[in-house]
Image (tube, helix red, strand yellow):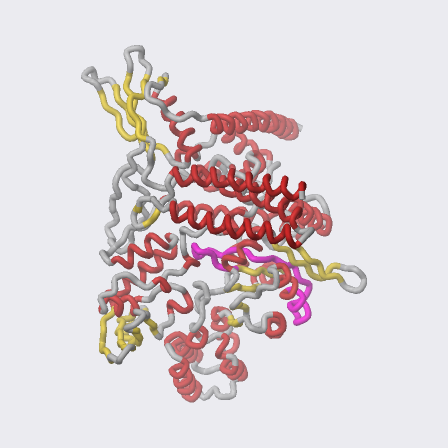
Amino acid sequence: MEEVSSSSQSVELLEHNEGNIENESEKTSNVEERVEDPKVGMLFDSIDELVEFYKLYGKAKGFGVSIRTSKKGTDGKVRYVTVACCHTGKQRIRSSNPLKLKPQSKTDCKAKLSVVLCPDEKWMLNSMILDHNHELSPGKSRFYRCHRVPQSSRKRRLELSDKTSILNNSFNSFGVDAGEHQNSPFLENDCIHLVDRVKCLQLQEGDATAMNNYFLKMQVDNSNFFYMMDLDEEGRLRNVLWVDARSRAAFKEFGDVVTFDTTYLVNKYDMPLALFVGMNHHGQLTLLGCALISSEDTETFTWLFQSWLTCMSGCPPSAIITDQDQAMKKAIEIVFPNARHRWCLWHIMKKMLEKLRGCGQYESVKFCMQNVVYDSLTKEEFEESWGRFIEKYKIERNEWLLGLYDERHRWVPAFVKDIFWAGMSTTQRSESMHAFFEGYVNSKTSLKQFLEQYENALTKKVGNENKEEFNSFKSCLPCITRYEMEKQFQSAYTTAKFKEFQQQLIGKIYCNLSSCKEGATISEYAVGEDISTGESHRRAIFYVLFNEVTSEVNCNCRLFEYRGILCKHQIVVLIQRMIYQVPDKYILKRWSKTVKRGHTKIRICYDNWFVKPEARRFDKMCNAFHEVADLATDTEDRCEMVMTWIHKLNGELKEAEDVCGTNKPISGGQVMSWQSFEFMGCLLNTILIYYHNFDHAFKMY
């Protein structure tokens, strides 16, 4: 009885604190909206009050804050204090390894407030600099350390939620408290330091009810949520596919290469879950669709692929990766006849023990097969090496190997590296299920529990992407060489992809030119590379073709073709030709950190959509445009009138974007000035005025 009473008191106390926290959150939000600009002559009762004021100002404007300096008077008392932007100071490279540098956030920003102690013990603002030399983003403010300090009442709530076990988990409770997960005042890792255990809230309804409720909730939140159900003759559910609005938008950015996997949860947890997964510009997996399937036959996969294709407006992927399932293969040939279909090499090599363990020299056979597969750079080289391998071990009649050879164009690296695979390596395990749901499901997870954990998993994924987006926005890896091409990629690529380029640049030290055959327009270079695998060392020769007219370089390692990253052998040849700025074709928009990605503007319940000012503006304009479209669909004249205006406005926007390019470069990148932000605000108002004029004109018409 004492335990029940204690728990009841805890719940009551928690509910009481919820009210306080909501009030605190509302007060904080109102303060942020009303925060005034600093002015010379402002008075503060203490340094803490000054810091709190500058933090609120910084959070509203989009930068972090730190105490920069303090100076004592002749009496030994602190009389001068400066608080500054956290980007103040110059970069300091402290790593002992010059080839493994950490991202730098210091830009020598001069923004600061300086105060002096007055005779009445108040602090007066006597000088200030408000301009920053880096981009500001209010939507990313919460990631700065100074803005991630939880209030005492929130800490108490974390403790209570952990003790009473009445919340799903401590971090998710603040997603509800703040209205959106991303509006939480601190990050999930901050919660982990306060609470060690994560609690699960189990739904009470049955599986069908839980699924129906989830789909209804998602559609209410965003009408672009898509789902399709497959029923048998008696009306019983066989298969279901769902894709949220954010995933549909992400497909437009990252749907060129898709991994389709049904193995992880089926094998480990007996849950028939299938995922469509892509790769984003940070090299992270991003969800493009989710399904529950009753069987793994051609009919089921055909229904699933066709439903998913319908969801994506009939746009198929250029390439798709699966395991060796023959039913999938047939369904892909039916639904995606023009897509390049590749088998996951990890799954194939994993089967070697099962398929070849009968061989007397298994370890030797395994080692030799791996060498043939991984070391063959060309199709001809693989054919020759495979023939010697089969003949050496007398395994001509092994049906598994015969089948693999017949389908070699689906899995051997030398056969698949001729097209873009978005960094999904030919040697990589297809980890889509593992990466998305490890830690969120277990062997006893029911469907109704999974639907809840599914959203939690996506919340974590969106948070990780936002964090990487912030890291690429806030800081950049220092260059390790003086080559101009490195600065090109530093300013253009996300941190993760720039790091990949740097690894190739570092690898240049193990390469040297062996020979050169010069032609009229095409020259062929032989580049030797010293390769170490364990204790063995060998010299590999790669051939690079250089075009004198276009400065294009093509290497037979095909790294650029299948990963979109310039390889070390190409770099060697470019530098040999004294070409220090690479042609534009080698800087892919797909890895760019400056491109505004459409999926980040989509409103969805597990993403902090409404705290992003650009997203609020996007939604505001979309609503206005939809009303215009409704008014203009009645007649062809109205439609042409709107289309003419849109084309005109599109040109004005592009011209205005070019005019706003008065930004100063920082560490090789470009930033947007405050004038640009003000201009965009005015532009939005202009668009809305246009809309109201059209609205009035249509009604009169």
Q: Is residue 173 above or below residue 83?
A: below
At a point 42% along the width and 25% down the height, the residue shown is 36
Is residue 26 at all visible to an observer of this figure? yes
Residue 660, x across and y down, in percent: 38, 44
Image quadrant assignment for residue 324: bottom right
Q: Residue at x 51, y 50 (%)?
A: 648
Q: What are the residue bounds of the magenta stretch? A: 278-304
User: In the rendered image of this protein, does residue 469 appear above or below residue 46?
Assistant: below
In x, y percent, where is residue 35?
44, 26
Among all residues in the image, which is located at the extreme right? 234
Which residue is at the front of the view, 145 or 525?
525
Q: In what quadrant of the picture does the C terminus appear?
A: top right
Residue 371 sits in which quadrant? bottom left
| Residue 581 % position (x, y) | 28, 61
Residue 96, image x and y in percent?
23, 50
* 165 and 469: which is toward the camera: 469
Choose between 70 and 655: the one closer to the eye: 655
Q: Is residue 185 above or below residue 457?
A: above
Residue shown at the point (57%, 28%) measured from the top left? 22
341 within the magenta span: no
User: Residue 503 falls in which quadrant of the image?
Assistant: bottom left
Q: Is residue 347 left or right of residue 630?
A: left
